[in-house]
Image (spheres, rainbow, N blue to C red):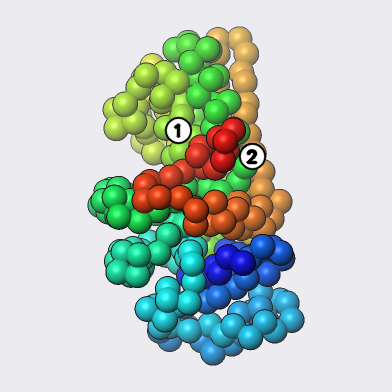
Amino acid sequence: MLKIGIIGAGGRMGRHCIAAVIADPDARLAAALEAEGSPFLGQDAACVAGLPACGVHIQADTAAAFAAADVMVDFSFCGAFPAVLREALRAKKPLVVGTTGLCPEDMQAILDAAKRIPVFQSNNYSIGIAVLRELVQTAAKKLGKNFDIEIVETHHRHKKDAPSGTAITLAEAAAAGRGYRPEDAFCYGREGISGERPEREIALHALRGGEVVGEHTVYFFGEAERLMLGHSADSRMNFALGAIRAASWLAAQPPGRYGIEHLLAPDA
């Protein structure tokens, strides 16, 4: 039975991941990790997730958590990620990265680490979003440059990064469909006298409020019509199930950098 550890166990996604592991008959929760000073330290991880006690208590000992698990799933926060990746390398354990807001240096560190351990990284673990990404790339290519592309994402008031990693992923898919370089095409909101919209622009807009789990809409505006492709998440369990599925798959892989496209490949 696969032993899975959860990093960021007290957070929203961490709690859902704990529940997803416990519900999986082929896996068991081996470790639950939180930062020093967390109010969840010492509590039974399953109880924190709203389930009957499982005997695994949330701890702050990173080395012990990695030692107890076959694969670790990280849904902590971007500031903690470098230390998490260093421990994964030291322990030589596969790592599923669900933390968003990673900087270019973090992404390069993932590529470097993937030479030594399996690393799975995605900005969104929803299967629906994975399919949406393919649709967006196809639409951007087939509709052509006469259709302007705008992306709007909405999340709960507690989300710390903007735009969402998923919105960026969708924008990258649109850019790939058009043959644009993201650094040349992306526009993050507008203000003041912004001038006429450039033809080769892909704009991203972030809304924050309430308890919205996650909504993403990609607009293609033509001269006399518009196409909208979108996705709404009804529960964070959607993402947790995808992340645990990725962890189960990753545990059997050789060192490398993996993403949702590998998980959905016909031979996966």
Question: What amino acid is labelled 1 in the image?
Answer: Ala
Q: Position of residue 71 (x, y in %)?
A: 48, 64
Q: Within 10 Å of the Cα at label 2, are there few (<14), some (14-19), or many (20+) other Cα atoms?
A: some
- Marks 2 and 1, how far apart at CA: 16 Å
Is residue 180 visible from the viewing direction of this image? yes
For badge 2, the amino acid type reads Gly
Identify which residue is drawn at 53% across, 63% down: 158
Assign the N terminus to one quadrant of the image.
bottom right
Q: Is residue 71 left or right of residue 88?
A: right
- Residue at numbered disc 2: 128
Residue, disc 1: 171
Q: Which mark is residue 48?
A: none
Which residue ends up furthest to the right in the rendered image? 52
Instruction: Return the x and y of residue 32 as percentages of the image width and height.
Output: 52, 76
Q: In which quadrant is the C terminus drawn? A: top right
Tag nearer the camera, 2 or 1: 2
Q: Is residue 230 above or below residue 82?
A: above
- For numbered disc 2, what is the local secondary structure? helix
Task: Compare residues 140 and 17 and report the one nearer the observer.
Answer: 17
The reply to whether the C-beta atoms of the residues labelled 2 and 1 are less than 8 Å apart is no
Q: Report helix, strand or loop for mark 1.
A: helix
**Disc on the earlier residue, 2 or 1:** 2
Q: Is residue 266 left or right of residue 33?
A: right
- Residue drawn at the location 42% of the way across and 73% of the way down: 66
Instruction: Say if 239 sits above or below 93 in the image.
Output: above
What residue do we see at 66% from left, 48% from top?
233
Residue at (40, 50) in percent of width and height: 254
Q: Which one is nearer the viewer's eye here, 15 or 216?
A: 15
